[in-house]
Amino acid sequence: MSVDLLIDGLLGLGMIVLALQVVSERTVLRSIILFVVFGLVMALAWTRLQAPDLALAEAAIGAGVTGALMMMAWRRLLIINPEHSADTPRGRSAVAIPVALLSTALVATIGLSALNIEPHIDTAGRVALDEMTDTGLGNPVTGVLLLFRNLDTLLEMAVLLIALLGARAISAPARPEEAAVVETTTPLVGALLATLVPLSILIATHLLLAGTNEPGGAFQAGAVLAAGGVALVLTARLQPAKRPGLATQLAVTAGLLAFVGIGVGIMAFGETLLALPGTWAVYLIETAMMVSIGLTLALLFAGAPALVGRRA
């Protein structure tokens, strides 16, 4: 047995065991911690599959943002009813095992079907890659998203903005004491933030710049950037605000505005709708999308229309 096969087997077995522990754990806090560990192991699995951008996105959103959101929800429940037990009910659903077996059978069927599919030479991906030679882009994923599926990408940005507006409409403003999970007096919090936040900005910038030729792009970069913002919210360095300022409104809509502005403006030069004039337009749109995605995810996490720095 090779070392690579052993590592892959341990990762697969570890994800199965952690998934079972997450759903069977009696204590909410322990279940949340196990879920975060599961997300980190999943990130290692993506790394083994040579998808570092997905690994970073999984670590930032699957383990980081989602785990922090669960932790904040758990804290809010304790604030609302501090006398209520934090343990989960000890009853077990009668359909849990049948659902698990059916899900396993479904995943196995899909996996076996994918292994038996014969590869075709003239696939959509190969055709798109052949047509990208004149665009200056080396990453086929970025090229497909911005050049061949640009309308889908534009609509994804619109859906993200609509989700933020919908969350603002139905949710009550979060209070600073509910948003913060880590006490500001906890030792080493400042040192951790001084390392984590600049590192998230650095990694996000790298993913953005590498996205034209290597795995990466605006969505992965925005996810990593949002993780840094979530860390600031959890430690009360950033606190919820009632009204968004002009800078917040521009940042949230920057991705959509840049995409529409360039995609519609190019029609004045006789080009088709949403056609991109060059690599500079790709960088401009990707940068605006990264800022919008990162800030929108942080605002959704905080449950607030805006964030402001903590007042001394």
Image (cartoon, rainbow, N blue to C red):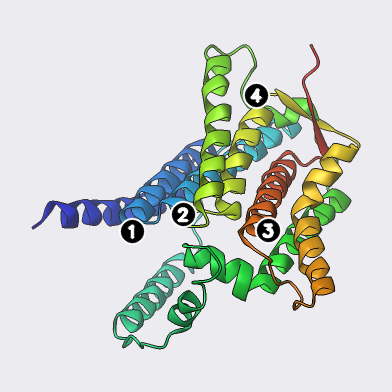
Which of marks 3 and 4 precedes in the sequence? 4
Reading the image, the residue beneath label 1 is 49
Measuring 55% from the left and 63% from the top, which residue is drawn there?
A: 142
Q: Amino acid at mark 3?
A: Ala
Confirm or deny contact between disc 3 and disc 1 (CB under 8 A).
no
Q: Are marks 1 and 4 in contact (CB under 8 Å)?
A: no
Badge 4: residue crowd in 10 Å (few <14, some 14–19, many ≥20): many
Quadrant in which the C terminus appears: top right
The reply, left or right, for residue 115 in relation to residue 66 is left
Compared with 187, 34 (above or below) is below
Q: Tell me residue 296's x, y (percent).
A: 73, 47
Residue linked to disc 2: 54
Q: Which residue is mark 4?
A: 235
> Sequence-wise, which precedes: disc 2 or disc 1?
1
Mark 3 or mark 1: name the one nearer the start of the chain. 1
The residue depicted at 77 percent of the width and 63 percent of the height is: 262
In the depicted structure, whether residue 150 falls above or below residue 252: below
Residue designated by label 3: 281
Dot 2, crowdedness within 10 Å: few (<14), some or many (≥20)? many
Secondary structure of the residue carrying tag 4 is loop
Q: For the residue labelled by badge 2, is the local secondary structure a helix, a strand or a loop?
A: helix
Q: Which circle, 4 or 3, is nearer the viewer?
A: 3
Find out whether the residues at labels 2 and 1 contact each other: C-beta distance under 8 Å: yes
Q: Position of residue 22 (x, y in %)?
A: 44, 48
Task: Tell me which numbered mark, 1 or 4, is placed earlier along the sequence.
Answer: 1
Q: Are marks 2 and 4 in contact (CB under 8 Å)?
A: no
Calculate the distance from the C-alpha at mark 2 to the C-alpha at mark 4: 26 Å
Left or right: 126 with respect to 89? left
